[in-house]
Amino acid sequence: MPLAGVNRANGALALAHYRRAEYHADAGDPHRSLSHIKRVLDYTRGPVPHFGGDVTATRAQAMMEITNVVENVMLKHSIAEHNKKNKGPKMPPVCFVMFQGGTTNASLSWQGGGFLQRLSEVGDVFIYQNKLYNIFHGLPGFEDYPPDIDFDLDYLSPEAHLRGVYADVRQKFPRHALVAVGWSCGAYLAYGFAQLFTVKSLVLFDPTLVSPAGVRVRLRYLKSFVGTRKLTAATLADMLGRLRRRPSMKTAELLLTLGCIRVTQWVSANLATPIVCPTFSFINVQSKEGRDTPADFTTSLKVSEIAYLRKHPEYHYRLYVDEDHDIYAHPGPQRDILRCLRSIMEP
């Protein structure tokens, strides 16, 4: 595979060292693997794009190819090192705790591209439907959403919400090791779950930004839709009552935004150190962004987010260009994701 932005000779040498690094990582020799990774970096140092600012299609492609070469090897020898340190009894069975993307029907969205079926072959899966997203039930295009919108302000408090999810998980899977999986804005709840409880790892699909700068941008973006409105117990009860009597897209979108602000504010106050366990993030960037690209989810912001998080040794990521937001449902990324999850489960 040629590396975009790297001359032919350096590209060949980089790939030769990459293959040697892979060989030693698979053989359980992370130190030799690391020496070859350093050579990969030597040959690709010049053209690797600087993080931050706008990213053109060419730079995004170069960044994807080069960093994936390096990060893939880093992931392998990180797992090899973990396995080396943890020899002994086979690990307990694993349960993947799934945190869905915004305004989705969890029972359907995770089935995209056959992902749920393939994931269930890797380990047990816990899926629940966030009641906040049920507020769209009864509106065109949301007919298959559950009608249950019986929740109060505590349910929208991330910590109370996550403790309820954890209790349900443990009731069904009392002895399983847990892996938190978050897609899009479900990443916030997955991050929070990893902070509050012991998890084996955290896996994210095109996640909402969690860096301090990214959270500030998201809060400004969300507040631009609601002005000075705030969510109180009384306003929540009033809005839910109106939605029960007569479904309204305007009311549902307002309530959704207020609920998202509440979660984002909690993230801002509580996730000062977002990476607390091995974290694997699969990220999509678009070579061309349209007018419908949310202001809090641009390629430039995603790249800056990676620059912030990649300083942490337990953060691993893969970049894809021009896939889609439901990245787990697409063949190429899905293969990488399932391979990663199987590796995580190794004793």
Image (spheres, grey):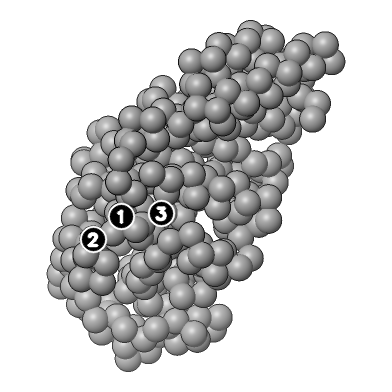
Measuring from the top left, give residue 38's x and y in whole percent. Answer: 57, 11
Decide if residue 243 is on the left or right side of residue 29.
left
- Mark 2 and mark 1 in contact? Answer it, CB < 8 Å: yes
Instruction: Tell me whether circle 3 and circle 2 mark residues in contact (CB < 8 Å).
Output: no
Per the model, the C-alpha gap separating discs 2 and 1 is: 7 Å
Location of the C terminus (image quadrant): top left
Q: Amino acid at mark 2?
A: Arg
Question: Which residue carries the number 2 mark?
Answer: 175
Rendering coords of residue 115 (x, y %): 57, 64
Nearest the camera: 119 or 245?
A: 119
Which residue is more in the foreground, 141 or 251? Answer: 141
Q: Earlier in the sequence, mark 1 or mark 3?
A: 1
**From what the image shows, is residue 92 above or below residue 25?**
below
Residue bearing mark 1: 92
Spatial CA distance of label 1 from label 3 is: 18 Å
Local packing at callout 3 (Cα closer than 10 Å; few below 14, some 14-19, many 20+) is many
Residue named by callout 3: 181
Residue farthest bottom in this picture = 245
| One can see residue 224 in this view | no
